[in-house]
Each structure stands twice: as C-alpha cells, then as structure tokens.
C-alpha cells in the first residue's frame, strides 16, 4: 500500500478552489483534502506542488486520434500495439486518465476505414481492459454509420466484449448534419486528400452520395430498429452525432440516446437539452474559436446553456486548455469549467468512482501550470495514485503502471 500527499497546490474541487491546499492518497484512493499546506519532508511521501493547479484526470468521451496513430500517413499501417502505446503516452501528457477511443465501423476505403480494422482495434482494447492496469483506462466509443448496416453485427459483438457499452449514431451524408455546407465540405475534402490521401475523390462522388441517400427511405429506419433491439438485450449508452434538427434528436432519443455529440444548430441543441441529454462539444473548437466545418462555435452553445462536456474530438492536449479558456473568458468559473472534462463525462457514462477531487474517489489526478499565454500544461499525471507522467522537476518518481504496449 502506498500513502503520499500532494501539498501547496491550488485544488480545483467540484464547487470551489482551494489555494495552497493538500490532497492525501492511500492505496490509490483520495483519503483527505485539506485547505492548508503541510510540511514537506525530505522523504518521498509529500510532494510540493509549488503552487501548481491540482485537478481530476480528464475523462475523454470521444477521440479520433487512434486512426492517425495507426496511419500517420495514408496506408502507413503501423503495428497497433505500438500505435496505441504511443498514443497513451500522448494522453497521459495531456492529463487524460480515462479514454474512449472513437472507432468507426464502416467500409470506406477513401477514409482509410474498414469493419475488419475496427474489430482488430476494439479487440485489442478489450484485451487491454482485461490485463494489468495501464497508464490510461482504455474504452471504446463505437461509431455506427447509419449507411453501413453490414457493420452492425460486428459492432454489437464488440460492444458485448467491453465493460462499458457506448455507441454513437453517425450520418455524414453531405448536405446535412456536420456537412450541411456542401461547399465547405468540398474544400475540407480537398485538404484531407492533400494531407492524408483520404476524402471524396471528386465533387461528382459527393453529389452522387447525396442523391442516393435522399432516395433511400429504408436504410436509416432499419439501422434504428437494430439498435433498438440491441438496446433491449444489452443496455448501452447511446450518443447522437452532429444533429441539425429537433426531429433527428427526437428519433434517437426514442432509441434511448442520452448524449448529444456536437449539435450543429441551436434548435437541435435546445431539443437535446429539453430531453435531458448531455451535450458534448469539442476542445479544438473552443481553442480555435469556432468549428472547422463552419458550424456552431462551442462558446455560443455554452453561452446559451447548451454545453455540458468537453471532449478531445481529435486533439487531447486541448482538453484542459479549453476548460481554462472558458474560465479565463469569464464564461464559467474554474470548477464548473473543469467539471466539463472530468465529473460531467464521468456522470454521463455512469462512473461513480472518479471525476472529482473528493474523498473516497480514485486518485486520478493531474498537476497543471499555465504558461505565459494562459494555456495550462501538464506537469504530472497520476492514475490510481501511481505516477504515470511527469515533466521537469516532477520527473523524479518512476512511472509505476504499464503502458498499453508493454504486454
């Protein structure tokens, strides 16, 4: 059993900030929180945080980055254990202790995606979950493309193998959802082809997909019916994705959806709020000041009371930076902003053992210090009380947990 304390830290509690406080950990659990510093001894049982912020570890509900780790260039196909281990090191450096890898189940060569590739990734993550503790707790967000019903059996098999059943219903048909602005989509697709060799091959392909989907009135209802059947036998947390209308929110809410990812109109976001759904926004959107696709800015949703959770989307280092930006811009107090990357996602996925600096919870905690621009940078990350990342003066204690690839 290990007992230690972190003192002289700015503790960001769920409802207040404690300046120069102390947090004590025993056997991986937070056992005491004090509003004063304690003496720093020469032994290793007390760490002087030197005024750094102490926050809970980030719980990230959506991150596409595993695809980029496996294929940093088109067709690179790096070994999965190596790619995930490399990504895990990025995650702990960003203060993430619980990660949901967004894995797309679809056959789309132009996007470097396949059902078999998705199954390989989720099986590996399921294997990790059953093995020794990693530096990050790995989960899967199963992305169901409503125009790829051939993937549903593989999706539901994969969901059943994992401890947390989480799916997201996606429709990336041009002309609606995230890609309502077709001209913007054509521009973005050209950029993706230049950078990664992925994306629509030409404008004609894009327009043909729009026509085909518009003429098909059976596919989406069929996929919804399969999800409803699966939900009855294997309860899942269901997320909507890129909703652009109240009707779309309602249709998925009736399936049991409780999370709304990236609503692209105020009308859709308001309906999600009316339905009691948790609304997720992307961290890069917050730092950039707007959507890359030309849709709503996350700050606009927050100002209207329509944002609850910040996810990485595709860039984990933006998580705490986005939360601090909301606080610095005066849109939220710091505890409320930090809850958007910690306690709120924990609640949305049913985790009751993490997400806050609170006695009795897991010691998944992170030390941060803002730079001269106000962006917070991670100095140390602890998972279950073990140091899994350290930088600068905090890098003296050895890393205690295995990385994802160390099997």
Image (spheres, rainbow, N blue to C red):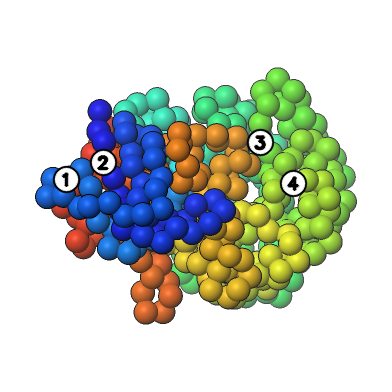
State which mark lies toward you, 3 or 4: 4
Q: Quadrant of residue 391?
A: bottom left
Label 2 crowding class (10 Å Cα cut-off): few <14, some 14-19, many 20+? Answer: some
| Residue designated by label 4 | 277
- Drawn side of residue 354 relative to residue 256, left or right: left
Q: CA distance from mark 1 to mark 2?
A: 8 Å
Q: Residue at x 57, y 69 (%)?
A: 326
- Total numbered circles: 4
- In the image, which disc is placed on residue 237? 3
| Residue designated by label 1 | 44
State which mark lies toward you, 2 or 3: 2
State which mark lies toward you, 1 or 3: 1
- Give the mark, 1 or 2, whose residue is nearer the N terminus: 2
Rendered view: 79 above or below 202: above
Quadrant in which the C terminus appears:
top left
- Give the mark, 1 or 3, whose residue is nearer the N terminus: 1
| Residue designated by label 2 | 4
- Give the mark, 2 or 3, whose residue is nearer the N terminus: 2
- Give the mark, 4 or 1, whose residue is nearer the N terminus: 1
Assess whether mark 2 and mark 1 are in contact (beta carbons under 8 angstroms): yes
- Give the mark, 4 or 2, whose residue is nearer the N terminus: 2
């Amino acid at each position: 059993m290990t007992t230690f304390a972190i003192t002289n830290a700015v503790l960001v509690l769920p409802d207040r900030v404690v300046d120069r406080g102390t947090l004590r950990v025993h056997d991986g659990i937070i056992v005491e929180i004090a509003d004063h510093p304690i003496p720093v001894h020469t032994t290793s049982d007390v760490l002087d945080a030197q005024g750094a912020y102490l926050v809970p570890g980030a719980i990230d509900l959506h991150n596409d980055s595993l695809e980029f780790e496996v294929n940093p260039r088109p067709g690179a196909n790096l070994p999965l254990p190596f790619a995930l281990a490399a990504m895990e090191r990025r995650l702990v450096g960003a203060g993430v202790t619980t990660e949901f890898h967004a894995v797309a189940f679809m056959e789309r060569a132009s996007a470097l995606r396949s059902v078999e590739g998705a199954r390989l990734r989720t099986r590996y993550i399921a294997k990790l979950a059953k093995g020794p503790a990693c530096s990050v707790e790995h989960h899967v967000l199963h992305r169901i493309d409503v125009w790829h019903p051939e993937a549903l059996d593989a999706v539901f098999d994969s969901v059943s193998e994992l401890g947390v059943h989480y799916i997201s219903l996606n429709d990336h048909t041009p002309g609606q959802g995230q890609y309502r602005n077709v001209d913007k989509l054509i521009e973005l697709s050209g950029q993706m082809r230049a950078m990664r060799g992925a994306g629509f091959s030409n404008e004609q392909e894009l327009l043909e997909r729009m026509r085909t989907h518009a003429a098909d009135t059976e596919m989406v209802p069929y996929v919804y019916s399969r999800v409803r059947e699966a939900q009855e036998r294997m309860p899942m947390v269901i997320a909507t994705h890129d909703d652009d209308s109240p009707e779309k929110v309602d249709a998925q809410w009736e399936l049991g959806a409780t999370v709304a990812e990236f609503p692209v109109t105020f009308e859709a976001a308001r309906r999600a709020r009316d339905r009691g759904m948790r609304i997720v926004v992307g961290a890069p959107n917050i730092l950039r000041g707007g959507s890359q696709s030309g849709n709503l800015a996350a700050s606009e949703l927050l100002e209207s009371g329509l944002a609850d959770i910040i996810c990485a989307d595709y860039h984990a280092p933006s998580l705490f930076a986005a939360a601090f930006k909301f606080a610095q811009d005066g849109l939220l107090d710091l505890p409320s902003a930090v809850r958007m990357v910690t306690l709120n996602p924990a609640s949305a996925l049913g985790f009751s053992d993490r997400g806050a600096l609170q006695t009795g919870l897991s010691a998944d905690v992170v030390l941060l210090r803002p730079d001269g621009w106000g962006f917070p940078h991670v100095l140390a990350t602890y998972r279950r009380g073990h140091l899994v990342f350290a930088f600068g003066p905090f890098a003296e204690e050895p890393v205690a947990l295995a990385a994802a690839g160390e099997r």
